């Protein structure tokens, strides 16, 4: 069984304070980050990893500007970076997406979840409890931000029977997940087959330097889980994609849109 993977840039994070990306360092730097989604064509249907940023960016950007103390740290999305554009370019409809993996549970991964009504939606079992339904959630889990009210309503009222809680397991042939934690309790690595190659995607690494120099991310709920994820992925994958590196479109250009058309 051969799968094909396409990577699609769905927005930018502007610049974030250096210590957010590199644990306890780069205090005098601002680092650019970007957002991506992945579409995998498998014998079991299309698998989508994340759904992009929310349509209304104002709540997220207000929070970010207050948190970072600067408007340099803000979400932006171009028209051609919207999920609807990707689907249109590939001649697909939302009903063509059989499976959606959400990792981590954040506003930049759940933003278009409400346009899907027939897909199975996969969440981390640990993250579902800790980040979504735990009545004693950690103080830095802002549910109205990571799951805006209209997205929560869609999840709990319209696609409840399509939610699948997973941990370390196969989703379909050619796609599996491994819980990593590290960044968030809902963080999972996605292991994908792209032809003969095994590709790992992880939000425990924001950039290539995190992986290559074993530098945990700064916004980490557990830095040791980050390091364990780096070790596992580098041992088990031919390539590891850090979730938010602006250089991904250069280093992994073979995964860009034309790949799925061929």
Image (spheres, rainbow, N blue to C red):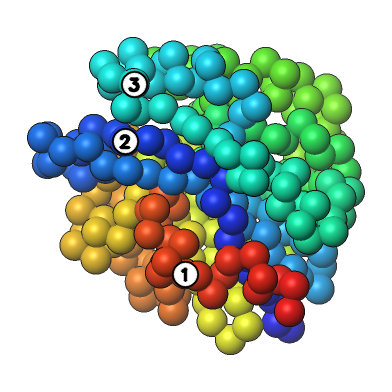
**Residue 229 visible in the displayed image:** no
Classify residue 239 by image quadrant. bottom left
Q: Which residue is mark 1?
A: 252
- Viewer-proximal residue, 262 or 39? 262
- Inter-mark Cα distance, 1 to 2: 22 Å
- Viewer-proximal residue, 215 or 232? 215
**Residue 3 visible in the displayed image:** yes
Q: Which residue is mark 3?
A: 71
- The reply to whether dot 1 and dot 3 touch (C-beta < 8 Å) is no
Location of residue 119 in the rendering, given as x and y in whole percent from the top left corner:
82, 46
The residue drawn where x is 23% and y is 33% is 17
3 w.r.t. 81: above or below: below
Seen in the image, is 251 located left or right of residue 89? left
Q: Which residue is mark 2?
A: 15
> Circle 3 — which element?
loop
Location of residue 203 in the rendering, given as x and y in whole percent from the top left corner:
43, 49
Seen in the image, is 214 located left or right of residue 145? left
Tell me which label, 2 or 3, sits earlier in the chain.
Answer: 2
**Alpha-carbon neighbours of circle 1 within 10 Å: few (<14), some, or many (≥20)?**
some
- Inter-mark Cα distance, 1 to 3: 29 Å
Classify residue 150 by image quadrant. top right
| Front disc: 1 or 3 | 3
Seen in the image, is 259 located left or right of residue 189? right
Q: Quadrant of the C terminus?
A: bottom right
């Amino acid at each position: 069984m051969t799968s094909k993977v396409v990577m699609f840039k769905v927005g930018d994070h502007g610049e974030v304070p250096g210590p957010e990306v590199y644990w306890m360092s780069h205090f005098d730097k601002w680092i650019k980050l970007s957002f991506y989604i992945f579409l995998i064509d498998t014998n079991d249907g299309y698998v989508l990893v994340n759904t992009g940023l929310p349509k209304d960016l104002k709540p997220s950007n207000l929070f970010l500007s207050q948190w970072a103390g600067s408007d340099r740290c803000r979400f932006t999305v171009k028209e051609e970076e919207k999920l609807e554009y990707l689907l249109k370019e590939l001649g697909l409809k939302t009903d063509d997406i059989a499976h959606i993996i959400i990792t981590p549970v954040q506003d930049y991964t759940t933003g278009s979840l409400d346009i899907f009504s027939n897909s199975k939606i996969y969440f981390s079992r640990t993250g579902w409890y800790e980040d979504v339904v735990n009545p004693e959630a950690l103080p830095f889990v802002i549910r109205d931000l990571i799951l805006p009210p209209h997205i929560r309503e869609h999840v709990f009222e319209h696609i409840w029977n399509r939610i699948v809680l997973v941990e370390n397991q196969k989703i379909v042939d050619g796609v599996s997940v491994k819980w990593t934690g590290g960044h968030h309790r809902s963080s999972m690595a996605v292991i994908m087959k792209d032809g003969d190659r095994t590709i790992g995607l992880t939000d425990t690494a924001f950039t290539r330097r995190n992986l290559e120099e074993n530098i945990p991310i700064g916004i980490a709920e557990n830095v040791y889980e980050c390091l364990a994820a780096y070790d596992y992925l580098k041992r088990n994958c031919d390539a590891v994609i850090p979730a938010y590196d602006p250089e991904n479109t250069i280093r992994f250009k073979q995964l860009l849109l034309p790949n799925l058309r061929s």
